[in-house]
Amino acid sequence: MPISKEYIIKRIIMLFLVVLGVLIIAFIITRVIPARPELLWVGPRATIEQIERARKELHLDEPIYVQLYYYLKDFFSGNWGISWRTRQPILSDIFTYLPATLELTITAFLLAFVLGVVLGIIAAVNYGKLIDRVISVFSIVIASTPVFWLGLMLQLVFSIWFKVLPSGMRISTEVAIATGFKPITNFYILDALIQLNIQALIDILKHMVLPVAVLMMYPLGLTIRTTRSLAIESLQEVYVKALQVWGLPRRLILYKYVLKNVVAPVVAALGLSFGYTITGALMVELVFVYPGIGYYIGMALLSFDYPAILGGIIFVAIIYSLTNLVVDIIHAWIDPRVKF
Amino acid sequence: MNVVFKEFMKFLIKRPLYFAGFIIVLIFIVVGSIAPYILTKPEDAWGLTYDLDKAFKPPSPEHLFGTDALGRDMLNRVILGSRYSLLIALSVVLLSLAIGVIVGLVSGYIGGAVGTVLMRITDMFLAYPPLLLAIALATVLGRGVVTTIIALATTWWPWYARLMYITVNSVKSAPYVEAAKVIGLSRWAIMTRYIVPNSLTPVITQAMLDIGSAILEAASLSFLGVGVPPPIPEWGRLISEGWQYIGRAYWISLFPGLTLLITVVGFNLFGDAVKEYLNPRLRNVAQVRI
């Protein structure tokens, strides 16, 4: 199903406006609300000269709309400030940490989608029976679990008590040294594959098991619930009854007709849950010392590194808006009824 | 009201899961309200004293949830923590509901330039992933119970504003509103008598469903160190206190987390129950056979 060019162009213009909105809110939070914004910018051990310089750099002596202008200009020219903690430009820090987060969230999302649709359909087909109840309760419980707590508990059981899974970092140092693993793209799975380094790949995957398991909980719960209620609805549709009367095999009805009605809304729901997952990643990466954007923002929070906190948050918000755009386009592509 | 309540109770009793949710919510609210009066070791709960001889004691009949790094009884701390979770979650949801309903109503019914501007502002807030903006705001505002409530409510109301806006827009064109216009009622009378009462159900249901999330997000803020400051025994904070001792004294994190989980599950079940009760279409799904 082709999507019109106008639709995509319209959505991209909207994306630009949304990013502008994100920036304006961030501007209000960091520059308008605090009494002395320059203090947030330079860190706790700054000298008076540094504070004065920050006042100039942030144009704090000028009217607020001039400040906003310079703020936006800095943002679009990639000048997001310097992190106190790493002493690096924030944007370059973010791009170093980004691949780890993408690897984690994409894996969690794909797993959640596949598992969630399967479990949701199983529950719907067995509506009201024990298995449906078990799956439903499971979906509610996993969507209500505090991710940081679950991360700690899994770490306790699997890494500390039974020592079956590693936790902390993306690859064990011994393995990296022994196998000569070198990050190229910073997407470690991809890097291991490029280098045909199977031992490193296994170690990398082992490091991902626990964080992915925790991270997929929320989208999994949501996918199960959405799939289940949609499948129950569409199983009652007249045409499904008609197909049954026609004597079509159960399996065919399920996979060809019911699934079609389920997938598009589930994709939309998953897109919404991406927001929760990305904030979940913040805590999951912090708990598992997994060096992604979440870990970066988390460490910045713990050391009150304001420029890094805000840079990270703005970046994640932009990624979130981009994901929403992509999800909407996929949604419109799968389901031609969608009109905006 | 009494009849509705009885009906709802009948509905709950027939569904054991929803009933369990209701009981959890009830216990949480009761314990949260009377927490300071049922503590056996109030000085432990408020974190005023410490006794290093009693530190890191595993769960035992004397200390059901064990003791923390400073020898304080975890059970007492968790009980007192419920008060803060209750206070924060209810304040956040009620405050957001009030702002959201007004903004949604103004932009949905009155509309015009003000309405458009309000909805665009709402969209700006919705462009942030949940919790992230609250983290930014809490960082700038500093730690505290009130700042946590402000940070969460500021980022929470747009969801209700959007929902209210959509509902008001659909109610606005209902035949009974047209009829009220024809007989010459004022805009204000139409709004207060017809629009508001008929638009509140979805947004209030959503608010019920959200209390669990509010508890969870408040705990997340505290866990990240930007929410409630020590020595207040907020559950997220208790979990983060146990973080560094996880291998040595797992119970410091385990029990607050478990309590948090059960409470949130309870609120989510109860929210689902209210939603299903108010929406008869969900209530009587015919048996599906395939």
Image (spheres, rainbow, N blue to C red):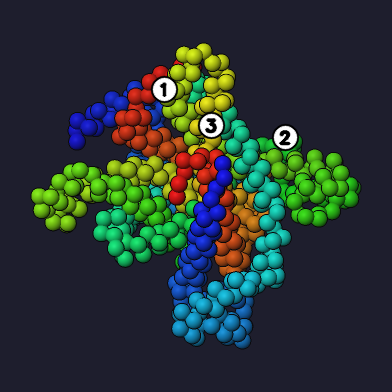
Residue B29: name its quadrant. Answer: top left
Name the residue located 56 percent from the left edge and 32 percent from the top edge. A117
Q: How many neighbours does mark 2 have within 10 angstroms: few (below 14), some (14-19), or many (20 or more)? A: few
Q: Nearer the viewer, mark 2 or mark 1?
A: 1
Residue B99: name its quadrant. Answer: bottom left
Disc 3 residue type?
Answer: Lys
Residue linked to disc 3: A260
Which tag, 2 or 3, sits closer to the chain's start? 2
Disc 2 residue type?
Answer: Phe
Q: Decide if residue B213 is in sight here.
A: yes
Labels 3 and 1 touching (C-beta < 8 A)? no
Name the foreground residue: B6 vs B235: B6
Report in which chain the residue with disc 3 lies.
A
Report in which chain the residue with disc 2 lies.
A
Please provide percent x and percent y for residue A155: 66, 41
Residue linked to disc 1: A238
Q: How many neighbours does mark 1 have within 10 angstroms: few (below 14), some (14-19), or many (20 or more)? A: few
User: Spatial distance from mark 2 to mark 3, Cα to Cα?
Assistant: 43 Å
